[in-house]
Image (cartoon, rainbow, N blue to C red):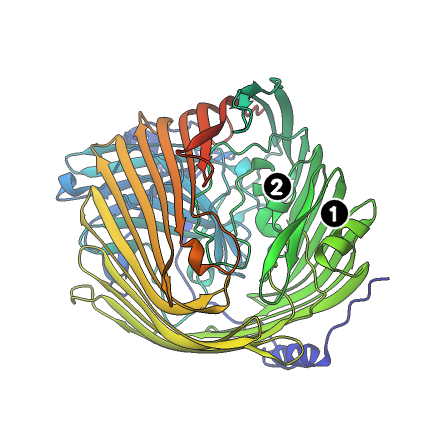
Amino acid sequence: MLRLTIGPGLTGILVCLLSLYPASDLQAQTRPSYDIPRVDSAPVIDGRLDDAEWETATRVAINIETEPGENIPAKVDTQALLLEDGEVLYVAFIARDEEPEQIRAFYRDRDLLWDDDWVGIVLDTFNDERRAYEFYVNPLGVQADDIWDDVNERADEAWNAIWDSAGEISAEGYTVEMAIPLKQLRFNPNSSLQTWGIQLVRYYPRDRENRFSNSVVDRNIACYLCQLNKARGFADLEPSMNLEVIPSLTTSYIENRQPALGEWVSEATDPQAGLDIRWGITQDTYLNATINPDFSQVEADNPQLDINNTFNLFFPERRTFFLDGADYFDTSQNLVYTRNIADPDYGAKLTGKSGVHQYGLLLANDEVTSFIMPGSLRSSIATLPDTASDVSIGRYRLDIFSNSTVGALITDRRGDDYSNTVISIDATLRPTNQDTVTIQSMRSSTRYPLLIQESFDQPGSLGDSFNFVEYRRNTRHWDVWAAYTDVGSDFRADLGFINRVDYSYFVSRVGHTWWGDGEDFFNRGRVALDYDTTSDQSGLKLEEEVEVFVNLNGPLQSYFNGLFGGSETFWNGEYFDEWFANLSLGFAPTRSLRTGITYRVEDVVDFANTRLGHSTRYTPFVNYQWGRHLQFNLDHTLQLFDVDGGRLFTANLTDLRTTYQFSARSFLRYTLQYDDRERNQGLYLFPVESRSKQLTTQLLYSYRVNAATRFFVGYSDAGFQDDSQESIYRTNRSFFAKFTYAWQP
């Protein structure tokens, strides 16, 4: 039986922190508010503002520079206009510019506009200062959206809404129009008049990265959403059918071959149809369901160099079903990593918020059962062949005071002789506007079948705890951070991304920030000192480390980030004295070019051979825009690793993506990913290949009507080379097509 036990230390900390709160909620500053008028006829979203369509709109001046200057008059004039018709929020922007030829605007795919000029709106629709929807548009109508979680201080950029936008550049600047359907938002349906937090912003990248807003931003207040202005509107909303039905069809033709046989063998073409449903039961409660879900991933992940690394790498979730409402399951520790659910036949998810209560439930099966097998110094992947599993995840969170939360989470995965259950409680407390305390305590119970016991030397059943406490203080000039993590050796979170156990970790950091006035050579500078120490549960010290951080921002959107330090590190029965220097520099000398490089030099453990080595790593990148349509993005990593006796290995990793963006809706992209590693066999203590190469290419065409109605068609191939091959040998090639359609009755 699983028992959740919380240490008395964490309980005492929680009680003491709650006693710091005043009897009433923390009072927010009085801020301006706006009334959003209702109209009978909707404006046409074409990027051209018709005075008659917008004559009754509420006008809001975006006239405050919050970055790099602190609440000073904005350099350029920007106006926002607000309307609603009971079903849609309409937003328009008039962004004037005395030098329109300097406007940075390019055709890009969705969510890739961040280096351009753009305007946007932030909406705290529950007016609870904990979560907000963010919608952004560049001058050519390219969209981006995300959800900002102010409790965990992270953005979910994978979230996609179905909305409309358009933009147009003129001799005076540019104009943008947005239409955001209310059915894409969640809010309290019981209110006769909605009051939302609102911020209207303009990003103006020139010599500096300027950010303008309709509201002041106090750098002495750590929370973001508590500083938004308010907007009122959407009175007496009529209930409507809030339903999206998204059928999908995926088909592919695949050929594989083995070097020993040499003949291409084709797999049977197997078209797969699926169905996703998103139903707004009420405006604050949503049901997502999927049958034979399309969990294919069209575009390749960004490659990561994993040589001389002992822990599994993290890759973000991209699949549609898991994205909507994903933030409802968030905690400070990553206990819900849905890429662990690899091949389900079905899935259902219920997420909602009612007053101060927030909840989420996810159920699915998985035909492939794989999970991380963590340790104190390394991790690996375990797979149960031919074993399906059932997945259940439940989350509840209670909002307390004006800006704090407490919650609980349960994850459960089981099939045949295997099971893993985690129960967690957590709290995020903000006793002042500068201080945040996060506490999370977890307990796991796991049962392994005989295959895992024998392959990974594990007991048949095991259970353990994971405790975490963190304190942060952020003011205009000072930031302080301290955290303590304690993870038992038998803790497992098979539905999360927990790739290390059997350790206790303490870290403390203090930093100081200087702010320029926007005209200084450096508009921002920061230095920080960090100390951390890690031990395993037996008390053996695994690492003790000291780090110094230096960060500078200057002209031409330039940045310099330095990290310097040293550590005493334990590996395979020995201690090694490591040191490192990591330098990152970058700038945007023209509106079409952004480039930079990261240089890291260090004495670091050679984990494969248990000795100290010397590593030099170069990671340059170049992003170049040729006209408004053609883009080149090149990322490269070169690592040179030396030991006594000579060069141990040389590793090259290249990711090249060339895109012709026909419009905001369609593109043609060529991707090349190349991994080349050379090893000196005489310097290894065990047999290795002297050379290994992997080459993957992809040609992809995409046409998008909206975030859910989209068509892909493409070709990809992959090959490798080792000591048995004289050149790269192609082992896979495929043609594929994917179509999804969003039907909204």
x%, y% of residue 549? 34, 72
Look at mark 1 in the image and give the residue it sits on: 392
Q: Categorize mark 1 by other alpha carbons within 10 Å: few (<14), some (14-19), many (20+).
A: some
Picture layout, residue 428 above or below residue 115? below
Q: Quadrant of the N terminus?
A: bottom right
* Quadrant of the image occupied by residue 74: bottom left
* Residue type of the residue flagged with mark 2: Gln
* Residue type of the residue flagged with mark 1: Ser
Q: Is residue 637 left or right of residue 171?
A: right
x%, y% of residue 407? 67, 62
Q: Nearer the viewer, residue 522 or 204?
A: 522
Question: Between tags 1 and 2, which lies in front?
Answer: 1
x%, y% of residue 602? 36, 68
Q: Is residue 112 left or right of residue 522?
A: right
Q: Quadrant of the C terminus?
A: top right
> Residue reaching furthest front?
682
Q: Which element carries disc 2, helix, strand or loop?
A: loop
Picture layout, residue 420 above or below residue 146? below
Marks 1 & 2, CB-CB < 8 Å contact: no
* Quadrant of the image occupied by residue 671: top left
Q: Categorize mark 2 by other alpha carbons within 10 Å: few (<14), some (14-19), many (20+).
A: many
Picture layout, residue 75 above or below residue 320? below
Q: Is residue 205 visible?
A: yes
Which residue shows up at 24% across the image and 49% down it? 595
x%, y% of residue 350? 69, 43
Q: Which element carries disc 1, helix, strand or loop?
A: strand
Which residue shows up at 49% across the image and 31% down it? 298
Q: Is residue 204 left or right of residue 164?
A: left
Look at mark 2 in the image and give the residue it sits on: 283
Q: Is residue 475 visible?
A: no
Q: CA distance from mark 1 to mark 2?
A: 24 Å
